[in-house]
Image: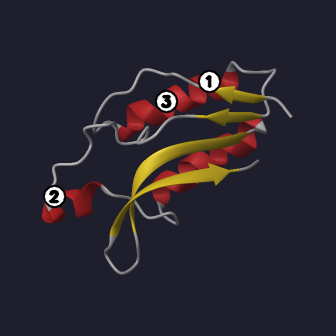
């Protein structure tokens, strides 16, 4: 198994841009089986406002639409991907999480 550590450009608070970056690397990394993006990659290092009311709206659930889009990319390119993000749990708690999604 070949693992690629990705140091990609990160834009705070632009999840669509970050997913686009992920797809770029998934598409152009034929030699890798698993791509690892960094801490807080999906939201950016300054993705939090440090206000619960604001941050709960930005955080994403692991079973939501954003993760579904990324799962579709992992399947399409037949690769495993991992990245950091701000997670919103079912009970409303927020976490700085990392997830691994395989193909």
Label 1 close to label 3 by CB (< 8 Å): no
Q: Callout 1: helix, strand or loop?
A: helix
- At label 3, counting other C-alpha atoms closer than 10 Å, the crowd grade (few under 14, some 14-19, many 20 or more) is few
- At label 1, counting other C-alpha atoms closer than 10 Å, the crowd grade (few under 14, some 14-19, many 20 or more) is some
Above or below — where is 34 with respect to 92?
above
- At label 2, counting other C-alpha atoms closer than 10 Å, the crowd grade (few under 14, some 14-19, many 20 or more) is few
Q: Which mark is residue 54?
A: 2
- Of the numbered discs 1 and 2, the one sitting upstream in the chain is 1
| Place of residue 7 in the rendered image (x, y in percent of width and height, measured from the top left) | 52, 22
According to the image, label 1 marks what residue?
25
- Alpha carbons under labels 3 and 2: distance apart: 24 Å
Which residue occupies the foreground of this view, 72 or 99? 99
Q: Considering the image in quadrants, where does the N terminus appear?
A: top right
**Which-is-in-front pick, marks 1 and 3?**
1
- Of the numbered discs 3 and 2, the one sitting upstream in the chain is 3
Q: Callout 3: helix, strand or loop?
A: helix
Q: Which mark is residue 64?
A: none
Label 3 close to label 2 by CB (< 8 Å): no
According to the image, label 3 marks what residue?
20
Left or right of 33? Residue 42 is left
Above or below — where is 93 with respect to 54?
below
| Place of residue 53 in the rendered image (x, y in percent of width and height, measured from the top left) | 14, 65
Q: Quadrant of residue 78?
A: top right
């Amino acid at each position: 198994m070949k693992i690629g550590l990705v140091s990609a450009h990160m834009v705070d608070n632009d999840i669509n841009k970050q997913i686009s970056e992920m797809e770029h690397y998934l598409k152009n990394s034929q030699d890798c089986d698993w791509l690892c993006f960094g801490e807080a990659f999906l939201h950016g290092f300054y993705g939090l406002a440090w206000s619960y009311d604001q941050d709960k709206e930005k955080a994403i659930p692991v079973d939501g639409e954003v993760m579904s889009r990324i799962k579709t990319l992992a399947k399409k390119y037949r690769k495993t991907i991992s990245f950091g993000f701000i997670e919103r749990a079912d009970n409303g708690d927020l976490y700085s999480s990392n997830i691994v999604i395989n193909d």
